[in-house]
Amino acid sequence: MNEANERICAAFDIGTNSVKLLVADLSGGVSVLHEETVVTRLGAGMLANNPRLWESPMHRTIEAVSAMAKTARDYGVDNRISTVGTAALREAANADEFKSRLWEACGLNVKVISGQEEARLSFMAVRLDPRWRHRVGLRVIDIGGGSTEIITGLTDRDQEPHRTSIPIGAVKLTERYMNADPPAVKELAAATAAVEGAFAGIELPAGKDYGLVGVGGTVTNLAAVSKGRFCTPDELHGLSLSHEQIEAELSKLVACTLEERKNVPGLDPRRADIIIAGAILLNYALGSVGCSTLEVSTRGLRWGVLYDSFLN
């Protein structure tokens, strides 16, 4: 076990679909020591549970986070760990039970953040990235399991970004509307209508030349699928993905069974059941912001948490 090092920090993102960990050394910049994603589907079945977290998803999430926390501490993190929870924990009536059990299991205190705060941190993850740090205007789309964030800001001014959090994500959309395998036409139509309704009335800043950046598993997986192979995060980071490519991949995916989707080159099999819903959300979001292309960031919310907690 490494000795504690005050410049080594960690950030956890406990989401509806997965748990993500980033461990970094902040001695003279940000040097990544470890990144890990575990799909635990914490929010599974919540819509049918009033909404409450089920025991199995809670148990596997706590087990996964506990193991990841040990990994972080083995790097010498000690107590410099920032942990946030998003949509599933925002909405679950028994979120306090989960937080208490996680604290008992591994000593991590989860801060459940609002949709607006999630949007702010996701934007920070892109705004402080060297690739986009000097871009005058940025618009960030973050599609999660339980919510979708769209954030717009000018990076060269001391100005608060415009943040919109839409309470629908890839897991929610899948559980609510997609039961057939492959999804039936009427299910796809209902899911698309639900997305249209969720976006209705959303007003976004206009009249600026904003560069569009997408974060989250839906974006990175569709980018890898467009390449037709497994890609490392570094290969995907900064890649351009067009609206036409997203529509083309969505058209192929909706015709596949779940087992066929698990074998699509580039697609993480653990995301095969929710990728169609995620692609519907991303496809509609691009249309709503009037952009034909977005750039891919593999550095999402956990990076914003790290920046905000330890570099601000």
Image: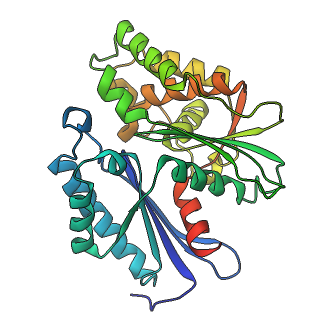
**Which residue is at 25% across, 60% downward?**
96
Is residue 66 placed above or below 142 in the rendered structure? below
Quarter-wise, where is residue 109 in the image?
bottom left
Q: Position of residue 122 (x, y in %)?
A: 58, 52
**Which residue is at 69% across, 35% downward?**
294
User: For this rendering, which residue is in front, 184 or 109?
Assistant: 109
Residue located farthest toward the top when viewing the structure as drawn = 186
Q: How many marks?
A: 0
Q: Position of residue 95 (x, y in %)?
A: 27, 55
Is residue 204 placed above or below 64 in the rendered structure? above
Q: Is residue 93 visible?
A: yes
Residue located farthest toward the bottom when viewing the structure as drawn = 3
User: For this rendering, which residue is in front, 241 or 113?
Assistant: 113
Q: Position of residue 74 (x, y in %)?
A: 40, 81
**Which residue is at 56% across, 71% downward?**
309
Taking 3 as reference, is 203 left or right? right
Taking 272 as reference, is 132 left or right? right
Is residue 19 placed above or below 178 in the rendered structure? below
Could you tell me which quadrant the N terminus lies in? bottom left
Q: Position of residue 56 (x, y in %)?
A: 17, 49
Is residue 165 placed above or below 181 in the rendered structure? below
Taking 137 as reference, is 127 left or right? left
User: For this rendering, which residue is in front, 213 or 96?
Assistant: 96
Q: Is residue 299 visible?
A: no
Quarter-wise, where is residue 97 in the image?
bottom left
**Which residue is at 30% across, 50% downward?**
40
Could you tell me which quadrant the C terminus lies in? bottom right
